[in-house]
Image (cartoon, helix red, strand yellow):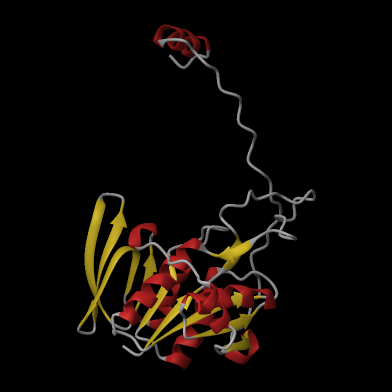
Amino acid sequence: MRTILVGTKRLIDYSVRVRVKPDGSGVVTDGVKMSINPFDEIALEEALRIRERGLADEVVAISIGTSEAQQQLRTALAFGADRAILVRADAPLEPLTVAQVFLQLVQRCQPELVLLGKQAIDEDHGQTGQMLAALWGRPQATFASKLEIEGGRARVTREVDAGLEVIEVDLPAVVTTDLRLNEPRYVKLPDIMKARRKPLEITTLRELGVELPAAPLRVLKVAPPAARARGTMVRDSAELLTALRSRGVL
Protein backbone atom coordinates (compact mmCIF):
# COMPACT_ATOMS: atom_id res chain seq x y z
CA MET A 1 0.00 0.00 0.00
CA ARG A 2 1.46 3.32 -1.03
CA THR A 3 -0.87 6.10 0.16
CA ILE A 4 -3.62 6.58 2.74
CA LEU A 5 -5.81 9.69 2.57
CA VAL A 6 -7.31 10.97 5.83
CA GLY A 7 -9.92 13.69 6.32
CA THR A 8 -9.35 16.23 9.13
CA LYS A 9 -12.21 18.65 9.60
CA ARG A 10 -11.78 21.86 11.60
CA LEU A 11 -14.56 22.49 14.11
CA ILE A 12 -15.27 23.68 17.64
CA ASP A 13 -13.44 21.57 20.21
CA TYR A 14 -15.68 18.93 21.79
CA SER A 15 -14.93 20.26 25.30
CA VAL A 16 -16.27 23.75 24.50
CA ARG A 17 -19.85 24.69 25.33
CA VAL A 18 -21.42 25.80 22.07
CA ARG A 19 -23.24 29.15 22.13
CA VAL A 20 -25.80 30.32 19.57
CA LYS A 21 -25.43 33.81 18.12
CA PRO A 22 -28.02 36.34 19.35
CA ASP A 23 -29.53 36.66 15.86
CA GLY A 24 -29.84 32.88 15.47
CA SER A 25 -27.71 32.85 12.31
CA GLY A 26 -25.26 30.27 13.63
CA VAL A 27 -22.96 29.47 16.53
CA VAL A 28 -20.25 31.64 18.04
CA THR A 29 -16.77 30.77 16.77
CA ASP A 30 -14.81 33.97 17.49
CA GLY A 31 -12.27 33.33 20.22
CA VAL A 32 -13.42 29.71 20.56
CA LYS A 33 -10.97 26.81 20.69
CA MET A 34 -10.98 24.87 17.40
CA SER A 35 -9.72 21.32 16.92
CA ILE A 36 -9.76 18.35 14.58
CA ASN A 37 -13.03 16.45 14.59
CA PRO A 38 -12.56 13.64 17.20
CA PHE A 39 -13.63 10.90 14.76
CA ASP A 40 -11.08 12.24 12.25
CA GLU A 41 -8.36 12.06 14.91
CA ILE A 42 -9.17 8.37 15.27
CA ALA A 43 -8.97 7.92 11.49
CA LEU A 44 -5.59 9.68 11.46
CA GLU A 45 -4.27 7.54 14.31
CA GLU A 46 -5.30 4.37 12.52
CA ALA A 47 -3.60 5.50 9.31
CA LEU A 48 -0.39 6.19 11.22
CA ARG A 49 -0.50 2.77 12.87
CA ILE A 50 -0.93 1.10 9.48
CA ARG A 51 2.09 3.00 8.15
CA GLU A 52 4.13 2.16 11.25
CA ARG A 53 3.42 -1.54 10.66
CA GLY A 54 5.05 -1.13 7.25
CA LEU A 55 1.78 -1.52 5.33
CA ALA A 56 1.77 2.00 3.81
CA ASP A 57 4.36 4.46 2.58
CA GLU A 58 2.68 7.78 3.35
CA VAL A 59 -0.27 9.34 5.13
CA VAL A 60 -1.82 12.45 3.55
CA ALA A 61 -4.07 14.65 5.71
CA ILE A 62 -6.79 16.64 3.94
CA SER A 63 -8.95 19.50 5.16
CA ILE A 64 -11.57 21.56 3.35
CA GLY A 65 -12.23 25.06 4.64
CA THR A 66 -10.75 28.51 5.16
CA SER A 67 -7.05 29.25 5.54
CA GLU A 68 -7.50 28.86 9.31
CA ALA A 69 -7.78 25.10 8.75
CA GLN A 70 -4.01 25.10 8.22
CA GLN A 71 -3.76 25.03 12.01
CA GLN A 72 -5.50 21.65 12.17
CA LEU A 73 -3.45 20.34 9.25
CA ARG A 74 -0.26 21.34 11.06
CA THR A 75 -1.58 19.41 14.05
CA ALA A 76 -2.13 16.39 11.80
CA LEU A 77 1.44 16.75 10.53
CA ALA A 78 2.63 16.90 14.14
CA PHE A 79 0.72 13.67 14.82
CA GLY A 80 2.82 12.09 12.09
CA ALA A 81 1.15 12.66 8.72
CA ASP A 82 3.71 12.97 5.92
CA ARG A 83 2.07 15.82 4.03
CA ALA A 84 -1.17 17.79 3.97
CA ILE A 85 -3.56 19.33 1.46
CA LEU A 86 -5.89 22.24 2.18
CA VAL A 87 -8.79 22.80 -0.21
CA ARG A 88 -9.86 26.41 0.22
CA ALA A 89 -13.59 26.94 0.71
CA ASP A 90 -14.97 30.09 2.27
CA ALA A 91 -18.38 28.62 3.18
CA PRO A 92 -19.44 25.30 4.70
CA LEU A 93 -19.97 22.58 2.10
CA GLU A 94 -22.65 19.92 1.84
CA PRO A 95 -21.56 16.26 2.21
CA LEU A 96 -21.97 15.56 -1.52
CA THR A 97 -19.68 18.45 -2.46
CA VAL A 98 -17.13 17.29 0.14
CA ALA A 99 -17.28 13.79 -1.36
CA GLN A 100 -16.70 15.27 -4.84
CA VAL A 101 -13.63 17.09 -3.53
CA PHE A 102 -12.26 13.87 -2.04
CA LEU A 103 -12.93 12.08 -5.33
CA GLN A 104 -10.73 14.58 -7.18
CA LEU A 105 -7.98 14.14 -4.60
CA VAL A 106 -8.34 10.35 -4.83
CA GLN A 107 -7.85 10.54 -8.58
CA ARG A 108 -4.79 12.73 -8.05
CA CYS A 109 -3.14 10.76 -5.21
CA GLN A 110 -4.30 7.24 -6.14
CA PRO A 111 -4.58 5.96 -2.55
CA GLU A 112 -5.29 2.35 -1.61
CA LEU A 113 -7.30 3.46 1.43
CA VAL A 114 -9.34 6.51 2.42
CA LEU A 115 -10.00 6.84 6.16
CA LEU A 116 -12.68 9.26 7.36
CA GLY A 117 -14.39 9.82 10.68
CA LYS A 118 -17.87 8.29 10.63
CA GLN A 119 -19.34 11.78 11.22
CA ALA A 120 -18.39 15.30 12.24
CA ILE A 121 -19.65 16.42 15.63
CA ASP A 122 -20.83 19.83 14.39
CA GLU A 123 -23.58 18.77 11.97
CA ASP A 124 -23.57 14.97 12.42
CA HIS A 125 -24.34 14.24 8.76
CA GLY A 126 -22.40 10.95 8.62
CA GLN A 127 -22.71 10.83 4.81
CA THR A 128 -19.40 11.79 3.21
CA GLY A 129 -17.69 8.37 3.35
CA GLN A 130 -20.65 6.59 1.81
CA MET A 131 -21.03 9.18 -0.94
CA LEU A 132 -17.33 9.06 -1.76
CA ALA A 133 -17.42 5.26 -2.11
CA ALA A 134 -20.39 5.53 -4.47
CA LEU A 135 -18.75 8.22 -6.63
CA TRP A 136 -15.42 6.34 -6.64
CA GLY A 137 -17.07 3.01 -7.42
CA ARG A 138 -15.14 1.27 -4.63
CA PRO A 139 -16.21 -0.72 -1.54
CA GLN A 140 -17.00 0.92 1.77
CA ALA A 141 -16.92 -0.21 5.40
CA THR A 142 -18.50 2.19 7.87
CA PHE A 143 -18.42 2.51 11.69
CA ALA A 144 -15.19 0.53 12.01
CA SER A 145 -14.13 -0.51 15.53
CA LYS A 146 -11.33 -2.76 14.24
CA LEU A 147 -9.35 -2.67 11.00
CA GLU A 148 -6.95 -5.31 9.66
CA ILE A 149 -5.09 -5.00 6.34
CA GLU A 150 -3.77 -8.11 4.62
CA GLY A 151 -3.16 -9.16 1.04
CA GLY A 152 -4.94 -6.33 -0.70
CA ARG A 153 -8.05 -6.69 1.47
CA ALA A 154 -9.37 -4.97 4.57
CA ARG A 155 -11.12 -6.91 7.32
CA VAL A 156 -13.37 -4.52 9.22
CA THR A 157 -15.31 -5.05 12.43
CA ARG A 158 -18.34 -2.75 12.36
CA GLU A 159 -20.45 -1.52 15.25
CA VAL A 160 -24.12 -1.97 14.33
CA ASP A 161 -27.36 -1.88 16.31
CA ALA A 162 -27.41 -5.66 16.81
CA GLY A 163 -23.77 -5.89 17.94
CA LEU A 164 -20.65 -6.42 15.84
CA GLU A 165 -20.46 -7.27 12.15
CA VAL A 166 -17.26 -8.39 10.39
CA ILE A 167 -16.86 -7.80 6.67
CA GLU A 168 -14.01 -7.99 4.15
CA VAL A 169 -13.58 -5.53 1.29
CA ASP A 170 -11.10 -5.30 -1.55
CA LEU A 171 -8.72 -2.35 -1.62
CA PRO A 172 -8.88 0.47 -2.64
CA ALA A 173 -11.76 1.20 -0.29
CA VAL A 174 -13.31 3.81 1.99
CA VAL A 175 -13.44 3.11 5.74
CA THR A 176 -15.14 5.34 8.30
CA THR A 177 -14.02 5.09 11.91
CA ASP A 178 -15.91 4.69 15.17
CA LEU A 179 -14.85 5.73 18.68
CA ARG A 180 -13.57 2.34 19.84
CA LEU A 181 -11.14 1.80 16.96
CA ASN A 182 -8.20 3.31 18.88
CA GLU A 183 -7.06 6.07 21.21
CA PRO A 184 -5.20 8.89 19.43
CA ARG A 185 -1.67 9.67 20.57
CA TYR A 186 -0.54 12.92 22.19
CA VAL A 187 1.42 15.43 20.15
CA LYS A 188 4.92 16.15 21.50
CA LEU A 189 6.75 19.47 21.19
CA PRO A 190 9.53 18.10 18.93
CA ASP A 191 6.87 16.76 16.57
CA ILE A 192 5.21 20.19 16.46
CA MET A 193 8.55 21.72 15.44
CA LYS A 194 9.10 19.08 12.74
CA ALA A 195 5.58 19.68 11.38
CA ARG A 196 6.56 23.20 10.33
CA ARG A 197 8.92 21.74 7.74
CA LYS A 198 6.51 19.24 6.26
CA PRO A 199 4.79 20.11 2.95
CA LEU A 200 1.31 21.66 3.05
CA GLU A 201 -0.30 22.17 -0.35
CA ILE A 202 -3.13 24.67 -0.83
CA THR A 203 -5.62 24.32 -3.68
CA THR A 204 -9.16 25.47 -4.46
CA LEU A 205 -12.47 24.01 -5.57
CA ARG A 206 -12.00 25.61 -8.99
CA GLU A 207 -8.56 24.08 -9.47
CA LEU A 208 -10.02 20.68 -8.62
CA GLY A 209 -12.93 21.20 -11.01
CA VAL A 210 -15.59 20.99 -8.29
CA GLU A 211 -18.60 23.28 -8.61
CA LEU A 212 -20.94 24.34 -5.84
CA PRO A 213 -24.56 23.15 -6.15
CA ALA A 214 -26.92 25.53 -7.95
CA ALA A 215 -29.38 25.42 -5.05
CA PRO A 216 -27.37 24.78 -1.87
CA LEU A 217 -28.99 24.07 1.45
CA ARG A 218 -29.51 27.17 3.58
CA VAL A 219 -29.59 27.39 7.34
CA LEU A 220 -32.65 29.47 8.20
CA LYS A 221 -32.22 29.62 11.94
CA VAL A 222 -30.18 28.10 14.75
CA ALA A 223 -31.66 27.81 18.23
CA PRO A 224 -30.35 26.34 21.48
CA PRO A 225 -32.20 23.36 22.99
CA ALA A 226 -35.00 24.14 25.38
CA ALA A 227 -33.92 24.53 29.00
CA ARG A 228 -34.48 21.39 31.01
CA ALA A 229 -36.80 21.58 33.99
CA ARG A 230 -35.20 21.22 37.38
CA GLY A 231 -35.39 17.73 38.85
CA THR A 232 -37.32 16.81 42.00
CA MET A 233 -35.68 14.94 44.88
CA VAL A 234 -37.70 12.19 46.57
CA ARG A 235 -36.93 10.36 49.80
CA ASP A 236 -38.19 6.89 48.90
CA SER A 237 -40.05 4.83 46.26
CA ALA A 238 -43.46 5.63 47.78
CA GLU A 239 -42.86 9.37 47.33
CA LEU A 240 -41.63 8.71 43.79
CA LEU A 241 -44.84 6.87 42.91
CA THR A 242 -46.93 9.67 44.40
CA ALA A 243 -45.06 12.25 42.33
CA LEU A 244 -45.46 10.24 39.13
CA ARG A 245 -49.20 9.78 39.72
CA SER A 246 -49.62 13.52 40.31
CA ARG A 247 -48.08 14.20 36.91
CA GLY A 248 -50.28 11.63 35.21
CA VAL A 249 -47.38 9.34 34.29
CA LEU A 250 -48.89 6.40 36.20
Foreground pick, 177 / 77: 77
Q: Is 80 drawn above or below residue 126 in the view shown? A: below
Q: Disc count in the image?
A: 0
Residue beneath the point at 57% across and 80% down: 193
Where in the figure is residue 74, as x and y percent of width and height? 58, 78
Foreground pick, 169 / 196: 196
Q: Quadrant of residue 70?
A: bottom right
Where in the figure is residue 197, as x and y percent of width and height? 57, 88
Image quadrant where one finds the N terminus: bottom left
Image quadrant where one finds the C terminus: top left
Foreground pick, 136 / 70: 70
Residue beneath the point at 66% across and 71% down: 215
Left or right side of 99 for 26: right
Residue beneath the point at 69% across and 58% down: 32
Left or right side of 107 for 68: right
Residue beneath the point at 47% across and 70% down: 128
Q: Quadrant of residue 169?
A: bottom left
